[in-house]
Every structure is written in structure tokens, then in C-alpha cells.
Image (cartoon, rainbow, N blue to C red):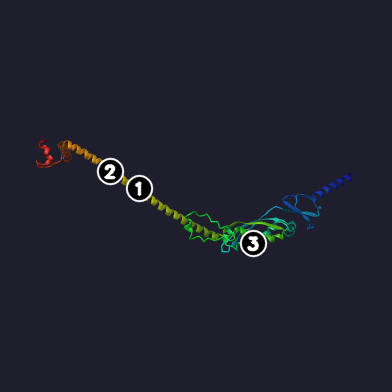
Amino acid sequence: MKSKGIILIIAVITCLLIIVTSAYVVDETEQVVVTQFGKVIGKTKQAPGLYFKIPFIQNANYFPKNLLHWDGDPGQIPTLDKTYIWVDTFARWKIVASIKYFQTVGNIISAQGRLDDIIGPAVRNFISSYKLIETVRTTNRNLDTFEVGLEDIVESKRPKAYAIKTGREKITDGILQQAKPKLEKFGIELVDVKIKRVNYVEQVRRSVYSRMIAERNQIAEKFRSEGVGESRKILGEKERDLKLITSQAYKLAQEIKGKADAEVTKLFAAAYGLDPEFYSFVKTLEAYGQALDKNSSIILSTESEFFKYFKGYK
């Protein structure tokens, strides 16, 4: 009786173990390939849900179903105009044929290696086939880097305008179209390829920075010269306005002074007309006070007109 209970427990445990090892769950972001002794059995399980397999014999191999990221190693690439640049690219890909993917690459690490081998040369091929400006720009839109008026300063040092014929977007699209068919045999669909960053190599970058500094110094010097000229212009206008105001004020002062002198003369003439003799007497006394003091010595004839009032006043 006791042995029957043990056997029953063992049987239950065995059944549970068989059920657990035979069941597997597929998530909505996953797809599963079932293999038996390394060979694929049936079709790929892509719909989410609960599935069963033969325990201990069959294995469930999980692969992601969503978009995956590939980040290329930045590398030095020469352009068609012999300019060396650092190019950093990235891509998006996904597994569309999981059985083929399992049979060829098997895992993400191997798939990343295949992407490196295929996308990397495609990037080098396209970048080296076009000029640098084609890799940088997409359209012929006028750049607004320089303000109006500064263009004339650096025009002689800037390269002539180049019409974009291909552009960055078409280059990345060409890389995509070249690499995409080569990845189909691995069950991989290349969704998109983009250039993350483009930069000059260190030697060229130093040369570019030096040229930019020289151009900005030239622009700054032009602004300084214009400032000095404008300052002198303002100072000249100030001096002109000052002289104009001074001359107008002097003219007005002279006019007022002339009118005052005329009024004084008129008053003197009127007073002189009332009593000429008294006027002469007063003016003579004023002359005495101005010409003579206690220390003055003067010898004049008694017939002098200047001392006529000393001789007696009639």
C-alpha cells in the first residue's frame, strides 16, 4: 500500500514535469522556431499564446520580432574630393524569416557581425563616391549662417556654390538598397540606414578651425573699422552742431547788444538834447575821476578845454 502511494507520487511528478517541459509561451514581441536534434520542425510560431512540444527532444528557440538596432563603428573614409572624414552610421533591422535566420546566423551576435560585414563596406563605397558636400547637405537651400553684409567679407575665401545633385538622403538610401538584398539570405530585413555623425579628421579639423577663426577675426576687424568711422562721423556732426549753435548764439547776442547800445545812445542823445551844457559838465567830471587821482600830476595850459570848468562856470 505504501509502495503504491510512492509510485503514484512519482507518476504525478513525472506528468507535471512532462507538462512543464512540453509547454512554452510565445510573447507578442517574440517568434519561436522549434527544433528536434538540431533540425527545424514545423513553421515559425509568431502568434502570441501557449504552445506545446515534445519534452526533452524538441527545443524552442526564441528570436525577437520587433525592430533591432545596429550601430556601426566610426571610421575614416576619404570622399571623392579627397577629404578625409569620420563617419558614424546606424541602422534598424528585423528578423523576417526566422527559420532561415536560425539556419544561417543563429543568434544576435552573429547577426551583428554579418551587418558589420555588409553595411560597413556599403557605407565606404557610397561616401567615397561623392563629394563631402553631398554627404553633408540634402538640398540647395541657401544657408543662413552669415548675416546680410558679412557675405561680402568672406566671399573671396569661400568656395564657389556647388549644386547638390544627390544629397545625404539619397546616399543613405543607396546604402540601404545595396546592403538590403545581401541580408535577405540570412532572414534579415534591413529597414533603414542613417548617418549619425560626419566630422573632419583631426588634422583637417584644425585647419578648418584656423580658417574659421581668421574669417571671424576679419569680420570683427570690419566691425571695429565701421565703429571707428561711425564714431568719427558722430563726433564731426557734434562739432558742426556745436559751432552752429555757438555762431547762432553769438549772432543773437550781438543783435541784442546792438539793440541795447542803440537804445543807450538814443537815451543819451535825448538827455543831451534836453540840456547840452549840463551833459557836458557831467561827462567832464566823470573824465576827471577817471583820468586823475591823488598821485597824478598833469601840466596843462589854463586855456585847455579840459579845465574850462575850473576857471569858473558861466
| Residue, disc 1 | 241
Q: The C terminus appears in which quarter of the rendering?
A: top left
| Badge 2 amino acid | Glu
Q: Secondary structure beneath disc 3?
A: helix
| Residue, disc 2 | 255
- How many neighbours does mark 3 have within 10 angstroms: few (below 14), some (14-19), or many (20 or more)? some
Residue at position x 42%, y 53% from top?
226
- How many neighbours does mark 1 have within 10 angstroms: few (below 14), some (14-19), or many (20 or more)? few
| Badge 3 amino acid | Ala
Q: Secondary structure beneath disc 1?
A: helix
| Badge 1 amino acid | Asp
Asked if disc 3 and disc 1 are in contact, CB closer than 8 Å, the reply is: no
Asked if disc 3 and disc 2 are in contact, CB closer than 8 Å, the reply is: no
Residue at position x 47%, y 57% from top?
152
Asked if disc 1 and disc 2 are in contact, CB closer than 8 Å, the reply is: no
Q: Earlier in the sequence, mark 3 or mark 2?
A: 3
Question: Disc 3 and disc 1: Cα gap in Å?
Answer: 73 Å
Question: Disc 1 and disc 2: Cα gap in Å?
Answer: 21 Å
- How many neighbours does mark 2 have within 10 angstroms: few (below 14), some (14-19), or many (20 or more)? few
Q: The N terminus appears in which quarter of the rendering?
A: top right
User: Is residue 269 visible from the viewing direction of this image?
Assistant: yes
Outermost residue on the right side: it is 1
Q: Is residue 22 above or below residue 288?
A: below
Q: Is residue 182 left or right of residue 229?
A: right
Q: Is residue 245 above or below residue 168?
A: above
Identify which residue, 88 or 250, lies in the foreground. 250
Q: Earlier in the sequence, mark 1 or mark 2?
A: 1
Of labels 3 and 1, the one closer to you: 1
Question: Disc 3 and disc 2: Cα gap in Å?
Answer: 93 Å
Q: Secondary structure beneath disc 2?
A: helix
x%, y% of residue 294? 15, 38
Residue 122: mark in rendering: 3
